[in-house]
Amino acid sequence: MTTYIIKKITIYLLIAMTLYLVIGYLFHLLIFPENKPEVSKYFKPHDSFYSKIEGVKQQVEKQENGFVHCSAEIEPFAEGPPRHIHTSFDEVFEVVNGKLTIWVDGEVKYIVAGDKLVIPKGIPHKPYNETNERIQIKGTIAFPEKFAYHLPQVYGILEENPDLAYSSGMILQMALFNTAGFDSYLADGPPVLVQKVTGFFFTPLARLFGYKSYYPKYDISYQNNIKTNKSE
């Protein structure tokens, strides 16, 4: 009798989860799709986006063949991003000056001018600056368009609301970003596969709670116009 009840509950739960995903994604993708700019035409040379928390400023060199090439500037003693993993692309670091520290899968490495370090996809890593020098990184960093597209959105959200990073809301927000193609997963979190499955499952719920994968106020053009107007 107990086994029969458990089986029945399990079937009901599977039906409920299936309906949630089918209806949720129907609303998310077809009935109320997000209104976002076209990714392939989004970036222009010299567009820039900055993370005060990470101490990193990215500047677009060019966008072509599905990739966005950026140079970067890392501030003195910048913390850099959290330890993270990309599953669809390698990340390349070449510095112009100074000494950049990069944590790579439990090992700390240093690169200086003339060095080149390739972080293969799937390997956890974290670049940061242990020195008092402002480090310039060459424009050899080629991000996939969807990753680069969402990066200033992540910067903008955490700049406006730093506490979000330590709340359950960040799980919903990152679910939307990664389902939309951001492809950045916490190295210190659950296994990447678990993060992907969780993100896929939480995406309809995130939309229901008002989260988005694109906010106009964090758009590069909008932010750069604000900076220009402030400087005039």
Image: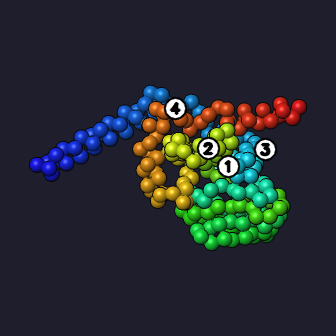
Up the image or down, 41 lies above or below 31; here it is below
**Quadrant in the rendering for residue 205:** top left
Q: Amino acid at mark 3?
A: His
User: What's the distance in space between the residues labelled 2 and 4, CA to CA?
Assistant: 18 Å
Q: Amino acid at mark 2?
A: Asp
Residue 200 left/right relative to 148:
left
Q: Residue at x 43, y 30 (%)?
A: 27
Q: Is the Cβ of the residue at disc 2 closer than 8 Å to that at disc 1?
A: no
**Label 4 or label 1, whichever comes before in sequence order:** 1
Q: Residue at x 44, y 42 (%)?
A: 202
Label 2 vs label 4, nearer the camera: 2
Q: Amino acid at mark 4?
A: Gly
Q: Is the Cβ of the residue at disc 4 closer than 8 Å to that at disc 1?
A: no
Q: Amino acid at mark 1?
A: Val
Up the image or down, 108 lies above or below 63; here it is below
Residue at which label 3 appears = 46
